[in-house]
Image (cartoon, grey):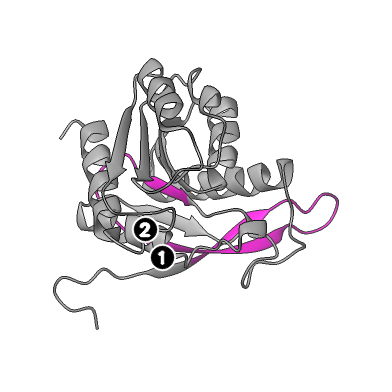
Amino acid sequence: MVQKGQFLERSTLIPVGGGQGAPLVMEGTVHRGQRSPPLLILPPRPEEGGGMDHVLAAEVAFAAARAGFPTLRFNHRGVGASQGARGSGGALVEDAEAAMRVALENAGTSALAVAALHGGARVALALQERHPAVGGLCLVSPDVDPLSLVRLSCPLLVIVGAQDTRLPRAALAAAVAEAGGDLEVIDDAGTTFHRNLPQVGRAAAAWLQRLSGG
């Protein structure tokens, strides 16, 4: 039984690839919601040890659900109970495309927002470049070249910890500003947000509310 204040998670299956044979199946987890846009959450890449149960993925999902937005997060092929061999590069984008189709179908919409964690930001950028359905990007502790953000044509939010020194802060701020996006710096936090984790969820939920016009 789901108590007041809790949000029911449901498992879902995501068909992907398959080539000449039957498609493989990735595992995913969804929260229901009535607001738009739905949110697709991309985990860190498999080589980073990323999965849908990553603490950042769970925090963003719960924050979005509390604000009324449906979410989907998933494990790439070869991670957790997802079938197939672990991929990289284009295979990860193919996984994300499959998850995007399920998220759009579940929500009955033609557009969605994407939140990506760490190296998953590279997958998110490739997904947005291919699909106009990606109507907003939220990149949490991204592992990308800041210049890759400049050409984005959709609403952008970048969330980093104040102690995260992997990307030059001035260059990141300039790139986000040129893209017309917002940079949220979480005080007293590093790349994994062991401190002030709830602030990540609050920032992502507030961004979704702005996208929805609320």
Which callout, 2 or 1, points to the residue nearer the camera?
A: 2
Query: In the image, what residue type sits under mark 1?
Result: Val
6 sits left or right of 80 in the view: left
Task: Give neighbour class at mark 1: few <14, some 14-19, many 20+ (Cα, 10 Å).
Answer: some
104 sits left or right of 78 in the view: left
Q: Which residue is mark 1?
A: 55
Q: Residue at x 74, y 53 (%)?
A: 87
Image x and y of residue 62, in percent: 29, 61
Q: Which mark is residue 15?
A: none
Q: Residue at x 39, y 25 (%)?
A: 176
Query: In the image, what residue type sits under mark 2?
Result: Phe
Helix, strand or loop status at disc 2: loop
Q: Which residue is mark 2?
A: 193
Q: Nearer the viewer, residue 144 or 39?
A: 144
69 sits left or right of 122 in the view: left
Q: Is residue 178 magenta?
A: no
Q: Nearer the viewer, residue 98 or 178?
A: 178
Helix, strand or loop status at disc 1: helix
Q: Nearer the viewer, residue 36 or 89?
A: 89
Q: Residue at x 15, y 35 (%)?
A: 214
- In the displayed structure, would residue 212 be above or below residue 107? above
